[in-house]
Image: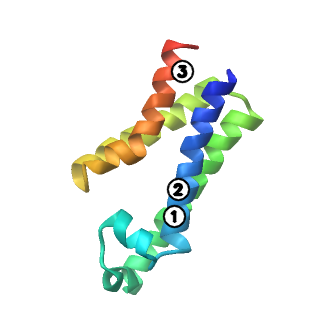
Amino acid sequence: MDITFMILATLVAVEHIYIMCLETIFTKSRTTVRTFNMDVEELSRPSVSTLFKNQGVYNLLLAVLILIAVWVMNDLFWTRCLLMYVALVAIYGGFTSSPAIILKQGAPALVALIYSFVLL
């Protein structure tokens, strides 16, 4: 893998760490309210808070797996698989939740994937 692709994939992982922070640590922050287009009251509900924390764990795990695939294993196949998963989940989220998810969450993964297939 070349360094540009490694950086692009790392940016996807960093984005998921950021999302995890919003979902698990800063659940009731103004940034979380704005990002997820939800009221603080809704985010304060125990059931919603629990769901957010659960999603946060998944986002952190995904970030860790991407970082391992890139920096420990240096494995193009697994990095592409994980980025494809991110892109597919973003597309699904775009259809089921908000179309903005496709751009916000899916675009970095798609850019990295396109780079990997066209320039590597």
Q: Position of residue 73 (x, y in %)?
A: 74, 32
Q: Secondary structure at mark 1?
A: helix
Residue located 37% across and 77% down the image: 48
**Residue at the extreme top:** 119
* Mark 2 surroundings: few (<14), some (14-19) or many (≥20) residues within 10 A: many
Q: Position of residue 102 (x, y in %)?
A: 33, 43
Q: Position of residue 89 (x, y in %)?
A: 38, 45
Q: Secondary structure at mark 3?
A: helix
Residue located 46% across and 77% down the image: 29
- Whole-angstrom CA distance, mark 1 to mark 2, is 5 Å
The residue lying toward the viewer, choosing from 90 and 31, is: 31
Q: Is residue 110 left or right of residue 93?
A: right
Q: Is residue 30 left or right of residue 10?
A: left
Asked whether residue 20 appears in the rendered view, the answer is yes
Which residue in the structure is indicated by mark 3?
116
The image quarter containing residue 3 is top right
Which residue in the structure is indicated by mark 1?
56
Q: Which mark is residue 13?
A: none
- Whether the residues at callouts 1 and 2 have beta carbons within 8 Å, the answer is yes
For badge 2, the amino acid type reads Asn
For badge 3, the amino acid type reads Ser
**Comes first in the chain, label 3 or label 2:** 2
The image quarter containing residue 76 is top right
Which residue in the structure is indicated by mark 2?
59
